Image (tube, rainbow, N blue to C red):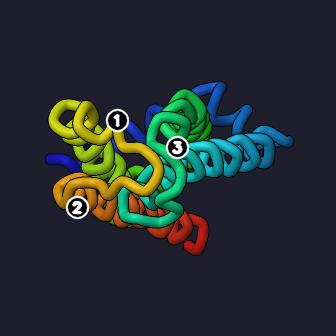
Amino acid sequence: MQSELLESLAIWLKSTALSAFVSGGWTWAVCETIHFLGLCLLIGSIGMLDLRLLGVAKKIPIGPLHQLLPWGLLGFALCIVSGAVFVTGDPDSFLQRDTFQLKMLFVLLAGINVLIFYLFMFREVEALGPGDDAPIRAKVVAAVSLFLWFGVIYYGRLLGVA
């Protein structure tokens, strides 16, 4: 059932003018650049916060690192938009591949991990100053975050190998 639905979606997407536009010209290359810049913003800001929570660069207070979050959200938005363009431009290479589905699963799990952090731990961690150690549960969330985001990058990279 899921395969039939994804196949139907792929057929429909290929028939759109947007798919033809993405497939030809510079659109794909521009979106690759936007996707890469989005990843840099996302992983750079989230990764720095995660590493700080894990004990790297403990002299940096959490507050200034948290101020980078809007850049991470911008990066995520750039990745979502450019990723949607990729799927529209070549739906057969994405929708029915296990690699793409695993990448989307990792994105979903990373989003849930962020929600858990902000709903249950952020207030406790927000006040950490220079030299303060994060609670163990915040360290676990940070380690899971790094694992999931690098999983997103790994499976995304595998998509380009086919």
Q: Amino acid at mark 1?
A: Glu
Who's the residue at 32% across and 64% down the image?
Answer: 143
56 relative to 141 in the view: left or right: right
Q: Amino acid at mark 2?
A: Val
Who's the residue at 79% across and 48% down the image?
Answer: 29
- Horizontal and vertical percent position of residue 134: 29, 54
The label number, if any, that marks residue 155 in the structure image: none
- N-terminal of the two: label 3 or label 2? 3
Disc 2 marks which residue? Answer: 140
Instruction: Assess disc 3: are there few (<14), some (14-19) or many (≥20) residues with their C-alpha within 10 Å of its C-alpha.
Output: some
Report whether residue 33 is seen: yes
In the displayed structure, 135 sits above or below 37; it is below
From the viewer's perspective, is the residue at label 1 or at label 2 nearer?
1
The label number, if any, that marks residue 126 in the structure image: 1
Disc 3 marks which residue? Answer: 87
Judge by depth and name the residue closer to the eye, 132 or 123.
132
* C-alpha distance separating marks 1 and 2: 16 Å
Describe the element under mark 3 as helix, strand or loop.
Answer: helix
* C-alpha distance separating marks 3 and 1: 38 Å
Instruction: Assess disc 1: are there few (<14), some (14-19) or many (≥20) residues with their C-alpha within 10 Å of its C-alpha.
Output: some
